[in-house]
Image: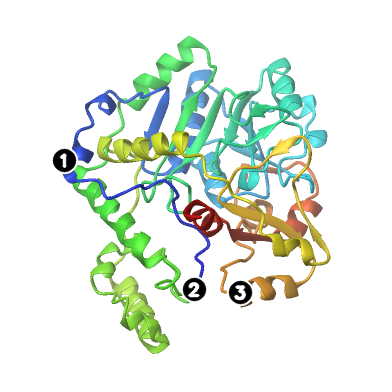
Amino acid sequence: MICRARPQYIERKYSKKELLDNSIFKNSFYKNRYYFTRGSYSLQFILDCYKNYLNKKLRVGVQSFTCVSVLEAILNSGNIACLYDVSIDDCSIDFESIKPEHELDVLIITHYQGIPNKSYEKIAIFCKENNIFLIEDCSHGVQSKINGKKIGSLSNIYIESYAWDKPYTSLTGGAFVINNTKPEFKTFLNNEFLKISVEKKRKALSDIKTIYWLLSYTTPENYYEDIDYSIFFTKSFLRYFYCFLLGKNSFYRKLFLFIYKCINRVHKSKKLTLQRLNPVKISFIEKQRNIAEVNDLSFDKPAYLDDLKGLTFFENDSSHIKWNRYSFIANDEQTLAFIKSKGIQAGHFNWPVCLHQIGKNNSIDLCLMTSFNNSEYLSKHIINMPLWYNSEKNNDE
């Protein structure tokens, strides 16, 4: 089975000595990048700081078709989420629906699966003219371009994610990167950032070991779709008890999953708290980033998709899409069944439920700014599938 996602730029196993040699990362702000143990923490931190800096509750514009962690970051920072529909052309917030009279303080652009927002430049100009703080959710990569402009280049701040399913990873983690902010606000951010505790080194090294184990687990000969690899994030000790050879047997996998569910009921995970990423993990990420800059792998659409009927693709002359998964729209489930029959994990992973469906009636700090016809349509009909295995095959050749 071809697993949906794998990190792309882990060249080899690094020794503990190599990972601990990280003196350049100990002073917190490496290349204007502020690292956290979760990607959503970086967004929550920015919004909380900006709220306190302006001394007002913020109205934050965001698309409904995005990850629930974005909504949680907005609400947990004590701000108001203003939800918008997306354009069917790019799965990103519909610029035509945003008006000055909405009085937004912050606008978040999500470049879905690396597909650039088609109105990227217009949005940047609009935000500058209306004094709106522009944040880009580049959790799906920063390599894509539109009209020659690289995503992440026109905002005040952009967000990165280092979750397992990203091209480079620290298992969990993320960062925000400062492009253009007032010096006073940057000083405020720095001071607040230094107040946050740092993840323990022991936890960081353990997570990196889990990453190496998952690289073995997610090879085509070892991966089975009926065990979600996220169970090894929440209960990493389970990797010591999972046998690849026995894992080929479906009964063993069902038994293992049953044992996990029993353990999960008794052994609750610790409550997560906002933390800075340990320098060990920052070093690990930057090693991957350096490899990515030298070896920019090509991810090409599988040729057999062109032979299928009724599909809608997102490529066009103005956009260059760079990501390790491929997304398209299919109006029937036969397409998904066909791809799965080829042993490829595909599905409606991002995102089958929209924020307006999750958040309605649950918060007074939620404003529905539009109808959500496109968001609801995409949540049912968009398909995500892996491309990493194509790039590895091409690289070997």
Instruction: Compute the Cα span from label 1 to label 3.
Output: 42 Å
Q: Position of residue 342 (x, y in %)?
A: 61, 74
Q: What is the secondary structure assignment of the residue under circle 1?
A: helix
Q: If you read the primary sequence from the N terminus, does the residue marked by circle 2 or circle 3 appear first?
A: 2
Q: Is residue 289 above or below residue 112?
A: above
Q: Position of residue 101 (x, y in %)?
A: 79, 26
In the image shown, does 181 or 224 lie closer to the viewer?
A: 224
Instruction: Give the mark toward the camera: 2 or 3.
Output: 3
Q: What is the secondary structure assignment of the residue under circle 3?
A: loop
Which mark is on residue 225? 2
Q: If you read the primary sequence from the N terminus, does the residue marked by circle 1 or circle 3 appear first?
A: 1
Residue drawn at (64%, 25%) of the image: 105
Q: How is the image coloured?
A: rainbow
Instruction: Compute the Cα span from label 2 to label 1.
Output: 35 Å
Quadrant assignment, res 383: bottom right
Instruction: Compute the Cα span from label 2 to label 3.
Output: 13 Å
